Amino acid sequence: MTDPKPWFPIETERLCLREFRPEDEADVHAYASRADVARYMGWGPNTKDETRLFLGQNLEAQTRWPRTDVTLAMALKEDDRVIGAIRLWGVNAEYDTALIGYVLHRNYWRQGLTSEAARALVRAGFETLGLHRIIATCDVRNRGSWGVMRKIGLRREGRFMQDRMVKGTWCDTYSYALLAEEWRAAKV
């Protein structure tokens, strides 16, 4: 998953998926410090130092190109406020496979924003980057996340039993995927 030129920012109806900026720190901390947002994640809730580290790592990564791991801010078009993050990273270059992941501030759940962002990133993955397969995983208890995966056309491929530890508890993970040919056939 490499491209000789950046393929973002990406604009959707309500969002701009763009690189992070130093001035995004307070917005990032507003979602990353919430226990409800980080509940099923392997990180968080973040302290201010952890948020600063996350942002610093992303700002540093943004200085390199090409790169096979891209994390973008999910910013509202109306005021450029960052309400979450979305990531696409190559997991198997030989087979043109990438993984998608996302996080969104609790105040914006159930409004279709994550689906809007994820759909745009999947489109970029297949149309711009020429990926063959995009996969996603989530904790089986995270109905919101696997609901997004279904909405954007990914199909459930399996359940991994106690495959990761999150906050001291062994958790099961759902695996979802979509092939480029399936995406093209379903595209309207």
Image: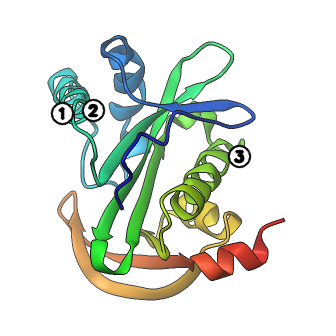
Residue placed most toward the observer, 110 or 157: 157
Front position among marks 1 and 2: 2
The residue that disc 1 covers is 57
Image quarter hosting the N terminus: bottom left
Q: Image height check: is 30 above or below 145?
A: above
* Residue 59 image offset from top left, x and y in percent: 24, 27
Q: In the rendered structure, are the residues bearing label 1 and label 2 in contact, judged by CB atoms less than 8 Å apart?
A: no
Label 3 SS: loop
Label 1 SS: helix
Q: In the rendered structure, are the residues bearing label 3 and label 2 in contact, judged by CB atoms less than 8 Å apart?
A: no
Q: In the rendered structure, are the residues bearing label 1 and label 3 in contact, judged by CB atoms less than 8 Å apart?
A: no
Residue placed most toward the observer, 27 or 95: 95
Q: Residues within 10 Å of mark 2 (few under 14, many from 20)?
A: some
Instruction: Give the residue type at disc 1.
Output: Gln
- Tag on residue 112? 3
Instruction: Give the residue type at disc 3.
Output: Gly
Residue at the image position 55 percent from the left and 82 percent from the top: 156
Instruction: Give the residue type at disc 2.
Output: Gln
* Residue 171 image offset from top left, x and y in percent: 30, 73
* Residue 174 image offset from top left, x and y in percent: 44, 78
Alpha carbons under labels 3 and 2: distance apart: 27 Å
**Which corner quadrant of the image does residue 64 belong to?**
top left
Alpha carbons under labels 1 and 2: distance apart: 9 Å
Residue at the image position 63 percent from the left and 64 percent from the top: 147
- Tag on residue 62? 2
